[in-house]
């Protein structure tokens, strides 16, 4: 979006330089700011984390008449922003739960002044439906023409299609009904086209009344790499090695862990290996958490071993590596978490350790969760998200960027990634030639094999199916007479990895269903496959496979 007449207003540029101390706009910022100042449209700003969304409402807020309200989901995010603004001399306040009554009264008093000096007020979403005092303030400012704008940070939280739905966000829609002439700015770093549509729908914003500022999500300075986990603690040992390697010595990184316990264990393992590491998770008390955050910001730790609770609102530019010790829960989540690396634009690394056991472990957790949020429908979505991550990890052919950006509705050509000398993804480094192979016929064989196995033995496992397809000489196979099956050895020339990928696709597409049974005595989990709901091959099953390796050692 460009409006030539409105470009470069002198005051706007002056404030940009003088107040914010910045020199050049980043992509889409100036356009979004101009559009906001024009006040004719609602704005939708989609930029990757660290892209500079805040400026798109902060600069207009300073220039506009009246008060801008910013709805933001986390107190830590709000604290971060208000501190930054106050340090720039911009009058702002936060109406969060931790304010004393005296502080709250002072904020309200300033707003009821005939010319409110406050330019920005941050609020958490739950306040919107609950606080009469706040609603009265909105109405008062609205009547006086002093309600400049509503800004919705992390706006994807309003859609339950997203990975981060927050029921409190739904109330934001009521603001549109009550203050129809107030422009909205929606900000997010994650929105698939489906979430985008839903967001507009929930917010009752018509497309023709809005302008979209959408930026590519590609992070050209990040190197993506997936590594199969070896034996117990293999990933941890490798992590310690990486931290101590010449490449990362003196550089800091985040190690994402599966649980609080894994955070603690990893931190202590790394510490013993000579890495300054600290655990960080939701189990810490507030004081400990702020303490860790501050020391991390001051480079006192090389590594933070964290659950995903860590990160939102922490803006450390020089994170040189992000390691996932366990698989992330969704591709979107992975993009966010890995995206905390290299915010300064310098080269940074993202390593993802994965294993089949991890898939089963997490899946089991999802399946057995009992809470109000964990409806069957919600579980299905989460399991699906998880299988997508696993398929991403198993994929040893396609460009990681292409695969990641697909989720944001972006088409990314691997030829782009191959052009990066320093930051090519692992697959673009190692694969020289690929081919699309139609696996529909083999898939039909697999379906009928699984059908026979479940009928005959009540169950089938992925390994068993692959063993049969590959014509395994194992005694157990022979003893059970499985070498007599029609499907025995029919996929001799297909690699085990590709068979795993194929089975993983058949599960994702609903041809197969993977269930988990838990042994009551030992608490161990075993995964079984059986036929899924889909049984007609309406479209062919196609996978890209590697024909030639570029550098087999990578
Ligand atoms: P987002 O909200 O998109 O994650 P922020 O608005 O917090 O990102 O901005 C990330 C960082 O980039 C901040 O430190 C901010 O000061 C910086 N920044 C934003 N715009 C610019 C710019 N035009 N030039 C230089 N730095 C910028
Ligand atoms: Zn690539």
Image: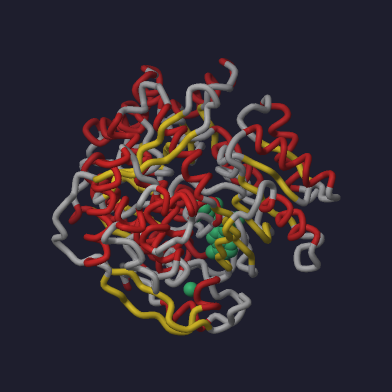
Q: Position of residue 64 (x, y in %)?
A: 41, 49
Q: Nearer the viewer, residue 220 or 384?
A: 384
- Image coloring type: secondary structure
Which residue lies at the image location 64% right of the left edge and 69% below the top edge? 347
Q: Nearer the viewer, residue 395 or 408?
A: 395
Q: Nearer the viewer, residue 41 or 536?
A: 536
Is residue 68 something that shows in the picture?
A: yes
Where is residue 505, by image quadrant? bottom left
Q: Give above or below for 524 relative to 153.
A: above
Which residue lies at the image location 48% right of the left edge and 61% below the top edge? 11
Relative placement, left or right, of 245 versus 500 is right
Q: Give above or below for 552 relative to 492.
A: below
Relative placement, left or right, of 465 versus 538 is right
Q: Position of residue 156 (x, y in %)?
A: 36, 44
Q: Give above or below for 43 relative to 91.
A: below
Q: Position of residue 331 (x, y in %)?
A: 43, 53
Q: Nearer the viewer, residue 163 or 291?
A: 163
Which residue lies at the image location 44% right of the left edge and 53% below the top edge? 390
Picture quarter with the N terminus = bottom left
Is residue 343 something that shows in the picture?
A: no
Q: Position of residue 142 (x, y in %)?
A: 31, 33
């Amino acid at each position: 979006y460009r409006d030539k007449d409105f470009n470069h207003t002198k005051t706007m540029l002056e404030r940009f330089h003088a107040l914010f101390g910045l020199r050049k706009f980043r992509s889409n910022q100036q356009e979004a700011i101009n559009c906001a100042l024009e006040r004719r449209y609602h704005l939708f700003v989609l930029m990757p984390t660290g892209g500079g969304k805040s400026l798109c409402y902060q600069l207009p807020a300073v220039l506009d008449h009246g008060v801008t309200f910013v709805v933001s989901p986390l107190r830590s995010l709000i604290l971060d922003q208000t501190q930054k603004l106050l340090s720039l001399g911009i009058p702002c306040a936060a109406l969060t739960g931790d304010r004393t009554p005296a502080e709250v009264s002072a904020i309200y008093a300033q707003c009821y002044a005939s010319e409110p000096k406050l330019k920005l007020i941050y609020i958490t979403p739950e306040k919107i439906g609950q606080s009469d005092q706040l609603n009265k303030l909105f109405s008062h400012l609205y009547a006086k023409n002093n309600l400049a704008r509503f800004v919705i940070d992390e706006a994807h939280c309003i859609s339950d299609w997203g990975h981060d739905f927050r029921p409190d966000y739904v109330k934001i829609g009521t603001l549109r009904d009550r203050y129809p002439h107030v422009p909205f700015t929606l900000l997010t770093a994650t929105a698939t086209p489906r979430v985008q549509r839903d967001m507009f729908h929930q917010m009752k914003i018509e497309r023709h009344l809005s302008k979209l500022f959408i930026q590519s999500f590609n992070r050209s300075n990040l190197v993506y790499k997936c590594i199969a986990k070896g034996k117990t603690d293999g990933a941890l040992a490798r992590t310690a090695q990486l931290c101590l390697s010449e490449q990362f010595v003196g550089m800091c990184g985040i190690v994402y862990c599966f649980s609080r316990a894994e955070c603690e264990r990893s931190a202590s393992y790394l510490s013993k290996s000579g890495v300054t590491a600290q655990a960080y998770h939701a189990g810490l008390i507030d004081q400990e958490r702020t303490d860790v955050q501050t020391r991390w910001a001051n480079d006192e730790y090389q590594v933070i071993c964290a659950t995903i609770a860590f990160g939102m609102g922490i803006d450390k530019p020089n994170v040189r590596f992000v390691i996932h010790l366990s698989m992330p829960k969704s591709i979107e989540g992975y993009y966010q978490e890995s995206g905390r690396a290299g915010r300064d634009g310098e080269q940074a690394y993202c390593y993802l350790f994965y294993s089949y056991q991890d898939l089963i472990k997490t899946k089991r957790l999802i399946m057995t969760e009992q809470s109000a949020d964990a409806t069957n429908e919600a579980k299905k979505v989460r399991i699906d998200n998880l299988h997508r991550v696993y398929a991403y990890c198993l994929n040893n052919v396609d460009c990681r960027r292409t695969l990641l950006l697909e989720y944001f509705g972006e088409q990314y050509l691997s030829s782009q990634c191959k052009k990066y000398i320093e930051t090519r993804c692992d697959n673009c480094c190692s694969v020289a030639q690929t081919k699309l192979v139609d696996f529909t016929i083999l898939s039909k064989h697999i379906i009928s094999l699984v059908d026979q196995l479940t009928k005959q033995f009540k169950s089938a496992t992925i390994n068993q199916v692959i063993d049969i397809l590959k014509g395994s000489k194992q005694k157990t196979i022979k003893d059970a007479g499985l070498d007599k099956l029609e499907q025995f050895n029919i996929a001799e020339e297909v690699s085990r990895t590709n068979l795993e990928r194929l089975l993983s696709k058949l599960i994702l597409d609903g041809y197969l269903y993977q269930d988990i049974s838990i042994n009551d005595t030992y608490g161990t989990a075993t995964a079984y496959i059986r036929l899924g709901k889909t049984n007609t091959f309406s479209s062919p099953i196609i996978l890209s496979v590697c024909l030639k390796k570029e550098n087999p050692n990578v």
